[in-house]
Image: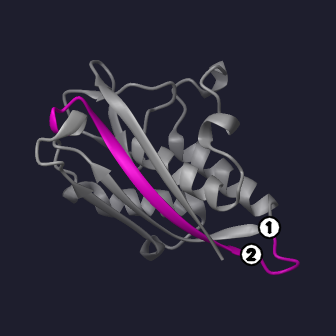
């Protein structure tokens, strides 16, 4: 078994949808990024890739490539899961925390877990998402952006297993 940790942050931007964990959330601002800027899924991708020693999301999906403009981060997570599978591993579970002052995320967390689990080929019970504030401190507290941390456990696939 191996463990990986991921972190990501994006600043708020006008005129963009807010997507977290593959769920579009009603908010007056979204996050700025080359893809859909899903900070939560990006952290999970980095944790998954890190567990398998496969670098990070920027290495595999550079923002210099136009084909990734506006792409759903869930598609990137699916591809990260395939990369990890080709390296001989499979995800076991994921745990993540989103740091945001607003909007309130609790009502959306079950759907986030379902979407992330589906992209990783896991049961929803194998994915946990938590949300917290920073009590008004730092860039998150000033409502300039959202950050996320994630940890993913992977295990060696059995010989002959199909990915």
Q: Quadrant of residue 96?
A: bottom left
Q: Position of residue 52 (x, y in %)?
A: 70, 60
Which residue was labeled with disc 2?
A: 156
Q: What number of labels is visible?
A: 2
Report the front residue among 52 and 107.
Answer: 52
Magenta-tinted stretch: 141-163
Q: Percent position (x, y) of residue 128?
A: 38, 68
The residue indicated by pointer 1 is 88
- Residues at circles 2 and 1 in contact by the CB criterion of under 8 Å: yes
User: Residue farthest to the right?
Assistant: 160
Instruction: Name the secondary structure under disc 1.
Output: loop
> What is the quadrant of residue 32 in the picture?
top left
Q: Residues within 10 Å of mark 1 (few under 14, many from 20)?
A: some
x, y percentage for residue 99?
A: 27, 48
Mark 2 → mark 1, Cα distance in angstroms: 6 Å
In the image, residue 138 above or below residue 156:
above
């Amino acid at each position: 078994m191996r463990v990986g940790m991921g972190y990501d942050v994006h600043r708020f931007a006008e005129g963009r949808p807010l997507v977290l964990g593959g769920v579009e959330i009603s908010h007056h601002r979204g996050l700025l990024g080359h893809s859909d800027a899903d900070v939560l899924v990006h952290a999970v991708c980095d944790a998954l890739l890190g567990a398998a020693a496969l670098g990070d999301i920027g290495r595999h999906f550079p923002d210099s490539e136009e084909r990734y403009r506006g792409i759903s981060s869930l598609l990137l997570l699916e591809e990260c899961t395939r990369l990890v599978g080709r390296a001989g591993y499979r995800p076991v579970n994921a745990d993540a925390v989103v740091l945001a002052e607003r909007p309130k995320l609790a009502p959306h967390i079950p759907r986030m877990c379902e979407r992330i689990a589906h992209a990783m080929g896991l049961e929803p019970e194998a994915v946990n998402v938590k949300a917290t504030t920073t009590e008004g401190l730092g860039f998150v507290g000033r409502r300039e952006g959202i950050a996320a941390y994630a940890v993913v456990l992977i295990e060696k696939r059995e010989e002959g297993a199909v990915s």
